[in-house]
Image (cartoon, rainbow, N blue to C red):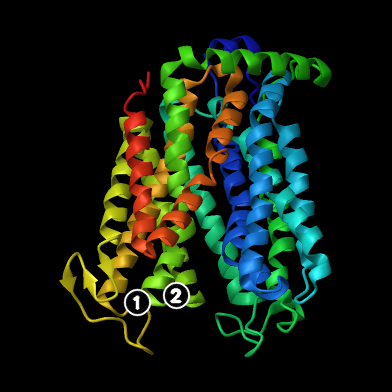
Amino acid sequence: MTTIAEDARMAGVQRTYPPRAAVISWIFFDWAAQPYFTLITTFVFAPYFATSIAPDAATGQSLWGFAMAAAGLAIALLSPVLGAIADASGRRKPWIAGFGAVLVLASCTLWIGKPGDPSIIPPLLTAVALASVGAEFATVFNNAMMPTLVPPDRIGRLSGTGWATGYIGGIVSLIIVLGFLAANPETGRTLLGFTPLFGLDPATHQGDRAAGPLTGIWFIVFVTPMFLFTPDYPAKRPLGEALREGLLELKQSIRSLPQQKSLAAFLLANMIYTDGLVSLFAFGGIYAAGTFGWHTIQIGTFGIMLAIAGTFGAWLGGKLDDRLGPKRVIAGSLLILLLAVAAILLVDKDSVLFVEVAPPQAGAPLFSSAAERAYLVLGCLIGAAGGPLQAASRTLLIHLAPKDRIAQYFGLFALTGKVTSFIGPLLIGVITAATASQKAGMAVLVVFFVTGLGLLMRVREN
């Protein structure tokens, strides 16, 4: 196992890199962590909580939103601080292990979420928030290991491959839950027509609740190779000394941001276009449900297809990143998102880009109307652009940030991705309510992507 000498690391020069097994093991962190986002916050546990545990769906959505907002605030405020401490102490793995343990324990706790029991709502939401904190913080420190794994001209491919691998892990975990564990309480059958494995009871939604323990076990299994085979930074200082030194360095970094114009412009651009992307993913299914009357099966299938598109997009984006540079990949992704959102606003159930088409028919096969197929294609474009946008963003940060403070700047990166995450959904909600038009609400996303692209143009990549 190769260890990086401190003087080489401080100088940003590294002549040796770890073997392929170490790199592949690092890539599987994304695979290990993704089920939390796929199973718990998006497709399985969040809808189950809102419809079967909370008193009603609207209350469930609001309570879930409050828990996610609290977790997001904690992540935004603490990520730069913890990153600075990690830079000062040197090592990354102890932080990944600690926050990974929080993710595992909190995820497993979700098994207690029996339907119709309001007394478990507070501990459930606490567990969800803690799992979110664990997943996000572990990701911050995992990202900070990237510069030591491959040469600079391969960082883009590494980031894109990791992101694509994470998408695949999310898809596989979702197929396992929906196809073999979670069953319809009325039919007792899973989405693939099987009775649930392990005798899971559909009446008490044990299959939905199993998404929590599965997320924890999945993380333990697939993150283990990273701890075994991927080298860490060498230790530099004891924790107490690292705390003082890290906070001092963070203060200096924040003060110096106005002088680092490219880095400051990128962090601001990332804050804005990430807000737009998160809002687009959050409201894409709701917009489709309102436009076409889609329900769980259609939206779930749509989500899986977006994830598949994102997998290929992130993989291809990683190759283009190394060839063209991350800034161009980000700019190209934002242009695709802009065009796709603009086109979606011109798709209705009986028209596509001002051309009248037959509306969806009740009982018709899945995505049988021309408008639904157009929305599906545009959605896949969004998925394909979203993957490389996020993967190339972390690559560009590595290009811009000081090498000896990389975890600290990934903390600032996490801050910019979280601190304003409420603005997009809030603006969409306010504009939709004021105009009584879903299209008007979604149109605000164009502003986010245009603004993010404009700020990106001020970034000097080298």
Q: Give the image location of residue 60, x and y in percent.
A: 66, 66
Where residue 287 appears, x then y in whole percent?
Answer: 41, 65
Earlier-in-chain disc, 1 versus 2 = 2
- Does residue 95 appear anywhere in the picture? yes
Q: x%, y% of residue 300?
A: 49, 70
Q: Residue at x 37, y 75 (%)?
A: 292
Q: CA distance from mark 1 to mark 2?
A: 8 Å
What residue is disc 1 on? 367
The residue positioned farthest toward the left in the image shown: 355
> Quarter-wise, where is residue 198 in the image?
bottom right
Numbered label tally: 2
Tell me if residue 9 can be seen.
Answer: no
The quarter in which the N terminus is drawn is: top right
Left or right of 312 in this view: 209: right
Alpha-carbon neighbours of circle 2 within 10 Å: few (<14), some, or many (≥20)? some
- The residue at 63%/24% (across/down) is 2
Q: Residue furthest front?
A: 434
**Which mark is on residue 435?**
none
Q: Amino acid at mark 2?
A: Gln
Which percent across, then down, holds residue 457? 31, 28
Element type at mark 1 = loop
Q: From the viewer's perspective, is 85 left or right of 252? A: right
- Picture residue at 33% right of the left edge, 55% below the top: 381
**Residue type pointed to by label 1:** Phe
Characterize the local packing of mark 1: few (<14), some (14-19) or many (20 or more) Cα atoms within 10 angstroms. some
Q: Give the residue at mark 2.
A: 298
Q: Nearer the viewer, residue 185 or 433?
A: 433
